[in-house]
Image (tube, grey):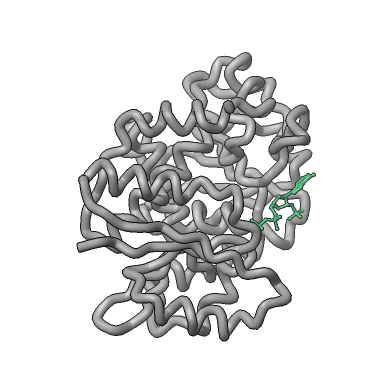
């Protein structure tokens, strides 16, 4: 069977998803296509979606700015996507359009591949920095996976508080960025979830990381550049570091698995994507 997959969003011109999914198809020797459907804000969204649904796709990815806007056009939403309030993967199943969110799960899987021992211990102390859509996905996935100590720091406190609402039992502490910078040495895992540090603002760091716990792991979801100023400082302060482009691969791996039932190993795609990003 030929797979027919795609992506909706705006802009999608430079998206890496076609490269990733076409590599998956090649790896398991199946034919197929992954089409970019660019939907400018001026377009009639419901008309475009109705037309895309008629194209006979097994599913499609959803990126900015439509991860929330797509929801009313779906027949069913899985529980984690419902909790996060955003969908990045849509699958056509038994005549129904079903929405998933693979971002948080993909992120956790990418961490688990590199740091399996860390991820077995749900008592580790985790700090998420930034409180946008990516933080929401990662926070809920950690919470559902049983992690008990997940705090959030953000410039706007209310946004961080809002994310914690559906998991009141977790007792998440919420901090300003200034407060968080004073307590970085209390965490086993620190994850930068905002866009701060992304090209062209590559010198920017959301917080300073000059004091870290021994054995700490620091992660950044920004992947352009691969080694952000945040990760550079973490490394200089003795931490192990985890790069953002791996999240991209594993969230795609999970989406592909939802569509096709096949989990394609990442193997050297990590290195290839790194080269691609570094130009
Ligand atoms: P998304 O589209 O993923 O929801 P977003 O709304 O752009 O992302 O926000 C991402 C995060 O980056 C937010 O936590 C934002 O902080 P605020 O909630 O205070 O807006 C954070 N962020 C973006 N630029 C920032 C900056 N220069 N300094 C600190 N935080 C920043």
In the figure, residue 19 lies in which quadrant?
Answer: top left
- Name the spot of residue 97 as percent of width and height, x first: 37, 79
| Residue at position x 26%, y 45% in the image | 264
Query: Is there any visible trace of residue 81 in the rendered image?
Result: yes
Quarter occupied by the N terminus:
bottom left
* Residue 80 visible in the snapshot: no
At 73% across and 62% down in the image, what residue appears? Answer: 158
List x then y, in percent, for residue 177.
75, 42
Q: Quadrant of residue 102?
A: bottom left
| Of 126 and 247, the residue lying toward us | 247
The answer to which image quadrant residue 119 occupies is: top left
Left or right of 132 in this view: 142: left
Along the line of sight, which residue is nearer the eye, 33 or 92? 33
Location of residue 18 in the rendering, given as x and y in whole percent from the top left corner: 45, 50
Which of 36 and 218 lies nearest the eye of the viewer? 36
Point 48% across, 69% down: residue: 83
* 178 sits left or right of 238 in the view: right
Mark count: 0
């Amino acid at each position: 069977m030929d797979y027919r997959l795609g992506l909706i969003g705006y802009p999608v011109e430079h998206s890496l998803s076609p490269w990733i999914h076409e590599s998956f198809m090649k790896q398991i020797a199946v034919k197929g296509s992954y089409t970019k459907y660019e939907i400018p804000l001026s377009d009639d969204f419901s008309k475009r979606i109705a037309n895309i649904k008629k194209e006979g796709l097994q599913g499609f990815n959803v990126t900015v700015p439509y991860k929330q806007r797509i929801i009313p056009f779906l027949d069913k939403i899985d529980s984690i996507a419902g909790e996060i309030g955003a969908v990045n993967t849509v699958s056509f199943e038994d005549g129904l359009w079903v929405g998933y969110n693979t971002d948080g799960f993909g992120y956790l899987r990418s961490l688990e591949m590199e740091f399996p021992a860390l991820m077995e211990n749900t008592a580790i102390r985790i700090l998420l920095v930034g409180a946008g859509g990516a933080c929401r996905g990662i926070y809920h996935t950690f919470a559902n996976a049983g992690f008990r100590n997940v705090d959030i720091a953000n410039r706007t406190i209310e946004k961080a508080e809002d994310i914690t609402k559906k998991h009141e039992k977790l007792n998440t502490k919420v901090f300003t960025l200034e407060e968080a910078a004073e307590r970085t040495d209390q965490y086993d895992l620190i994850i930068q979830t905002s866009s701060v540090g992304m090209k062209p603002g590559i010198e920017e760091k959301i917080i300073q990381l000059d004091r870290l716990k021994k054995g700490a792991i620091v992660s950044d979801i920004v992947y352009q550049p691969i080694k952000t100023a945040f990760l550079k400082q973490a490394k200089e302060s003795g931490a192990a570091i985890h790069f953002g482009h791996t999240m991209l691969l594993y969230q795609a791996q999970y989406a592909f698995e939802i569509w096709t039932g096949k989990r394609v190993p990442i193997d050297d795609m990590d290195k290839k994507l790194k080269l691609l990003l570094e130009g």
